[in-house]
Image (cartoon, helix red, strand yellow):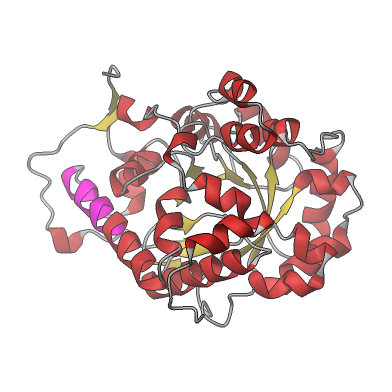
């Protein structure tokens, strides 16, 4: 089986580590709420610019991106995940956007799994982000393990994901979140690359964001409410579907999380959680994000091929460029300054 071939569905079914991937592909774990529909740009009928004037390029982690887009952290640590990561990375390189790998905990504990995360050979120029669960800092991980995660993928930054609700619902969950602000701050001071913090579907508040920035962590990824429900995924795994439904809508909707974090001086805000299109990317930027991230829209194409992911990325960027033109914005900076209005949800 080579990297260009689609993933057989039986591979996802029989690989225990692939359980998250398999369930995440099911429509039932996606939230129906579309919080970005509550926001719209004021249409500029005479923008006084040409389509060719629109340039969505930005700088991120010292590198130029063709658009303010991050293929968000998803997976790793299994054969199926290795193929997905390489498809995502190849597409990100071709499109000129950033890419993050999934949690590397398994590869730190079992180095034989490291190759499922290594993508630098197919993504030599774009930013690649390493990823560990912040809670692991209370379960034996420290600066050495964080450096190992960065070195493993030759990363431009390290992402700590925070997932209180997910851990609480996991059968094997780890729920000691004491002291993690200071622990992450110590890693940020000593690791030598930027450190980001992202939620996994419940959003970051302004108070949490300010506490992180005070500790030198200025890359903040909302990963807010509105997309994949990890409450539903973990409840499916544990067999307690009712508990998952109880908490399926727990969290801060992504547009609100973006607005809160955008008020923090010095923060670089990555808007993610329920973004489904280039128009959603534009709205995230308009609400105050510096970059937007998407996961689920790229996951199914990534089970097919790098080309399928590349086509999806190209479509998202095309939609973003059209939205920028209609908002009268030549650049991402101008898009951040474009007028937006809040409207009633249907």
Taking the spot 47% from the left edge, 48% from the top edge, the residue there is 25
* Of residues 166 and 331, the one drawn nearer to the viewer in this rendering: 166
Q: Write down the quadrant of residue 43 in the picture.
A: top left
- Left or right side of 82 for 152: right
Q: Nearer the viewer, residue 20 or 160?
A: 20
Q: Residue at x 56, y 22 (%)?
A: 245
* Residue 132 place in picture, x, y as percent: 73, 54
**Residue at horizontal 82%, vertical 54%?**
187
The answer to which image quadrant residue 144 occupies is bottom right
Left or right for 281, reference 155? left
Is residue 174 toward the left or the right of residue 50 in the image?
Answer: right
Q: Position of residue 235 (x, y in %)?
A: 64, 31
Q: Is residue 154 visible?
A: no
Residue 319 percent coordinates (x, y): 24, 52
Q: How many marks?
A: 0
* 257 relative to 42 in the view: left or right: right
Q: Residue furthest right?
A: 140
Q: Which residues are magenta?
A: 317-326
Query: Is 325 included in the stretch rendered in magenta?
Result: yes
Q: Name the one closer to the observer, 112 or 120.
A: 112
The chief SS type of the magenta part is: helix
Query: x and y percent of residue 126 in the render?
Result: 50, 72
Examine the structure image and report whether residue 286 is included in the region drawn in magenta. no
Up-down: is 134 above or below 11?
above
């Amino acid at each position: 089986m080579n990297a260009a071939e689609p993933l057989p569905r039986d591979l996802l079914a029989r690989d225990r580590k692939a359980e998250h991937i398999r369930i995440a592909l099911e429509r039932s774990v996606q939230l129906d709420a579309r919080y970005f529909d509550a926001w719209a740009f004021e249409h500029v009928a005479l923008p006084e610019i040409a389509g060719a004037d629109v340039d969505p390029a930005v700088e991120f982690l010292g590198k130029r991106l063709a658009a303010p887009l991050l293929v968000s952290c998803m997976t790793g640590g299994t054969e199926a995940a290795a193929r997905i990561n390489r498809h995502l990375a190849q597409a990100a390189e071709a499109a000129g956007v950033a890419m993050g790998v999934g949690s590397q905990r398994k590869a730190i504990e079992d180095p034989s799994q490291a190759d499922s995360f290594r993508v630098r050979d197919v993504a030599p120029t774009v930013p690649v982000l390493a990823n560990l669960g912040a809670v692991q800092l209370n379960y034996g991980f420290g600066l050495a393990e964080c450096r190992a995660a960065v070195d493993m993928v030759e990363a431009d930054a390290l992402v700590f994901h925070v997932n209180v609700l997910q851990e609480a619902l996991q059968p094997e969950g780890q729920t000691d979140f004491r002291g993690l602000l200071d622990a992450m701050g110590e890693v940020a001071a000593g690791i030598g690359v930027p450190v980001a913090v992202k939620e996994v579907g419940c959003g970051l508040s302004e108070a949490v964001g300010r506490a992180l920035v005070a500790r030198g962590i200025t890359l903040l990824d909302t990963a807010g409410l509105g997309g994949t429900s990890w409450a539903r995924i973990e409840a499916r795994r544990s067999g307690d579907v009712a508990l998952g439904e109880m908490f399926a809508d727990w969290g801060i909707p992504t547009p609100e999380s973006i607005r809160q974090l955008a008020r923090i001086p010095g923060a670089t805000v990555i808007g993610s959680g329920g973004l489904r299109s280039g128009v959603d990317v534009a709205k995230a930027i308009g609400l105050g994000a510096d970059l937007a991230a998407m996961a689920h829209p790229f996951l199914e194409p990534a089970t097919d091929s790098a080309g399928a992911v590349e086509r999806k990325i190209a479509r998202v960027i095309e939609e973003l460029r059209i939205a920028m033109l209609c908002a009268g914005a030549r650049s991402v900076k101008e898009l951040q300054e474009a007028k937006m209005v809040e409207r009633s949800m249907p």
